Image (cartoon, rainbow, N blue to C red):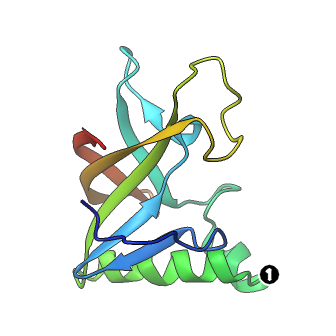
Amino acid sequence: MLGFHGLAPRFHWSHEVDQTIVFDAWDHQWQRDDKGARIRYPLRTNGAHYNLAESKQNPRAGHSRWQCHVDMVIGGQRTPRAIVPVANDPNAKPNRGAKGWRPLVIDGHIEVEDGQIWFCVDGETPL
């Protein structure tokens, strides 16, 4: 469905597939509404996760690639999507790895609020 025919490298947090950027988005980092539905995910924030200044001060391959991909979707060069590993076991630790998890693909759009960049949900598709 996403165009992958093999495993993506673990140090890549975002992936370019044709005209789409697919962001790896851990389930526990989503902002949710009062019913628990995913609303938005931080692509570039002023906080600890996905911080552009931190990316420039302490470059890491995954983070630098992520920020480049964020620039591409902000500039309208690519369409954003997210893939979320959702645990088969709801009691599993939130960031444990891919074993025992199933992917959820989320289509969405970008919104900017107070200098922060968010991936906002338009629809979800379990794989």
Query: Residue 2: image x %, image y %?
Result: 29, 64
**On the rendered structure, is 78 left or right of 61?**
left
- The residue at 70%/85% (across/down) is 56
The quadrant of the image that shows the C terminus is: top left
Number of numbered labels in the structure image:
1
In front of the other: 114 or 49: 49
- Residue 43 visible here: yes
Query: Badge 1 local density, few (<14 within 10 Å), some, or many (20+)?
Result: few
Q: Residue at x 37, y 33 (%)?
A: 38
Q: Amino acid at mark 1?
A: Asn
Residue position marked by numbered label 1 in the rendering? 58
Picture coordinates of residue 3, whole percent (x, y): 28, 71
Residue 87 coordinates in the image, percent (x, y): 55, 31
Please report the residue visible at 63 percent of the width from the left and 42 percent of the height from the top.
Answer: 99
Q: Residue furthest front?
A: 5
- Residue at horizontal 38 percent and vertical 66 percent from the top: 22
Q: Quadrant of the N terminus?
A: bottom left
Q: Is residue 76 above or below residue 26?
A: below
The relative height of residue 124 versus residue 117 in the rendered view (above or below) is: above
Q: Residue 101 falls in which quadrant of the image?
A: top right
